[in-house]
Image (cartoon, coloured by chain):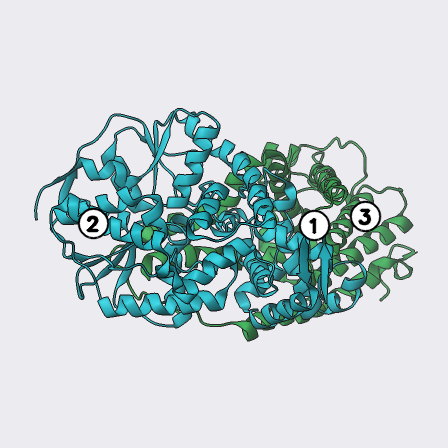
Amino acid sequence: MSVTMGQESINLDALKRAIDDVFYSQIDSTILYYLQSCVNCKACEAACPFTPTSLKYSPVNKAEIARQLYRSRFTVWGKTIGRIIGGSKKYLNLEEAETMADYVWHCTNCGACMFVCPMAIDSGALIDLLRQVAFRAGMAPKIYTDIEQLEVSGKYWDIPVFRDAWNNLILKMKEVIGKDIPLDKKNSEVLFYASIYEAMVYPDVLVKVAKILDMLGKDWTFMSKPLGIRPPVGLVIGDKEGALNVMKKVYAYFTEMSPKYVMLTAGGFEYPALRYTMHEVLKVQPKYEVVHVTELLAKWYEAKEFEIEPIDEVITWHDPCQLGRRGGVFEAPRVLMKALSKNFKELPSHGVNSFCCSRGGGGCGLPSMVENMAKVIGIPISEKDKKFLDSTLEPLIKAGKIKVNEINKIKASEVLTGCPVCIESIGFSIDYYHANAKVNHIIELLADRIKVTKK
Amino acid sequence: MQIPYATYPVGNSLYPLALDLFVPTVFFFFLGASYRVFRYLVTYQKPFIPYPSSELRQVSSWNKIANLVNTFANSSRVGIKRKPVTTGVGLLFHIALVLIIFLLAQHMVFWAYYIPPYSALFPLAIPESSEDGLLALTTPNHASITEFVHDIWGPLTVILNGQFLTFFLIIFLGIYLGHKLLLAIEGLSLRAGDWWFFVLLYIDILLGFFATAHIPSNVYWYDNLLGAHILVAEIIIATLPFTRGFHMFEFYLGKVREWYFMVYRRGEK
């Protein structure tokens, strides 16, 4: 059965199948704990970047749909009186399905709710279940699924603008270093990993990383062609199968190259996905270690392989959610930040409590950025997609205000971070609120201040 | 069960019934708790750990312990900063509730009856009122001319007494219930379990207060109120494994789990 509302169309039969598939196949003890142990205290409201937009977007409120579907299937009272008093739902009606679709795109799976939850419940994991339901039922925004399918099918490499961006990046690296760069070299110490997305949004950062590796005389290699647009995009839009296929390809390449380290400059969802999720899902113990560029640089800095010429300005570090909370990388960037400036100050919300920029994950980047990418790769933007992308702007503005207030409070002139999406979204907020600061990847500042002491 | 109390037939009140039902209540609680734990066991999947060790992630033992404390404290710390009113009310409510359940003199006598070693905590007993340190049941309910209590709490007894804590609970639990009503009006998620647990708790606190304060002041009402107080508490205990009340046990599981995966394992993979 397909119900149409205006221009919207939801296949309720597909939705029912998706709900059953996801909820009967994915309940393990961890998810069970998240589903049944919430006390509805709403402490998670304090951490979520979407709550300033509306309390209905608080983690507990969004995850409640998952709990209602769970109770109907797995609890005695949910099967009995729960249905009568609205405590559980076997399936969703049209209005509830639309609410679910709205909620799942108002969660970046940043994990902040878990750390402030007195019960340590990861609401993001439950909202991710709903995102999988939405994807299977064909309710994910088409603009996202189109981009993701390009990655899953491997056809992204047929797109001229992507090929050009990548090839130009390699050319620029050669130009800056003054010699050929190693491509797809096996058994090197560092496999410098990047995605097309990064090549498009901050090619200069990637070039500077190559320059640092060359300056330090490292045995490194780069990829002759990228492994995806931002692999595995499927994880953030609810396509587990698609993500699995992409991760298999990525793992095969990493294994073939067999480096000691796979080094990422992106600290968004790619970091925990490629460091942890990929190996956990494939059940493999890699011979390499996936690390963020700050981890390796901090290690080399502490080994006195280089010095850092400090600046006087007040600088601060924004902990990307996925790199920090999900990935566990907090100390390494701070080693570098403290060396970069004696005036390094922490944002009021940092570490596990870092306030998310509200993009990435289910936030899926700046709407203008997604729109531009769709245009350059020839994906048509429908009215429905446009409406959806516009609707993601308000949370960005609301969360951005909190972030900018924090930056202003410590009077930081520069915010450094390690995630392309954080850079885009914080940059947007700084512009929107006319803050007297700038935001950059840490490499931007670091690359020009490194003085090599030994090779 | 017929308990003689002077010439008054206690056996006709709710009190002995409540006492008789305590053991079955505990049995039901353990049955429910076992069911809940069993569900975790049957759905448990051993996590796959891809990195047996990481040369970049050496975390000192001291750091791990400090982070364990932080794991438990973080929620309250952030809450006080960003949601001061509800967090403050919640914390004070929990402190008052824990004190009154486990250290109120009358409750301690009850627990010690079923678990004799509990009597070791008697020196920590919180008196019913700040006027004296004796049980209200055995003393007249009027201003005492006896000396100030000589217990471990000392002058703190002005705050740490049953009456004060009960007023505290009535006010804070009332704020919580009011908050729930506001959420219902705003159309935000509320569960039957919220009402069940909070309303029962509220009723139970009121019953306990009326009984110990002798309102109304006659022994017939006292026995029934005390009996009802215990009965409602038994309903809460028996249904704990199926309500939000079970968080008092799972709280530790959740936080230690968070610490293990987010701090300990992150450093050791």
C-alpha span from label 3 to label 1: 29 Å
The chain coloured cyan is: A
Q: Which chain does the residue under circle 3 lie in? A: B
Q: State the residue position of label 3.
A: B207
Which quarter of the picture shows residue A447?
top left
Up-down: is B30 above or below A327?
A: below
- Disc 2 element: helix
Is residue A71 positioned above or below A54 on the image?
A: below
Q: Residue at x 36, y 55 (%)?
A: A271
Q: CA distance from mark 2 to mark 3?
A: 80 Å
Quadrant of the rendered image containing residue A301: top left
> Three-letter amino acid code at disc 3?
Leu
Q: Which residue is mark 2?
A: A171
Q: Chain B: give its colour.
A: green
Return the x and y of residue A422 as percentages of the image width and height: 41, 42
The reply to whether residue B57 is visible in this rendering is no
Q: Is residue A430 visible?
A: yes
Residue occupying image coordinates x 89% and y 42%: B216
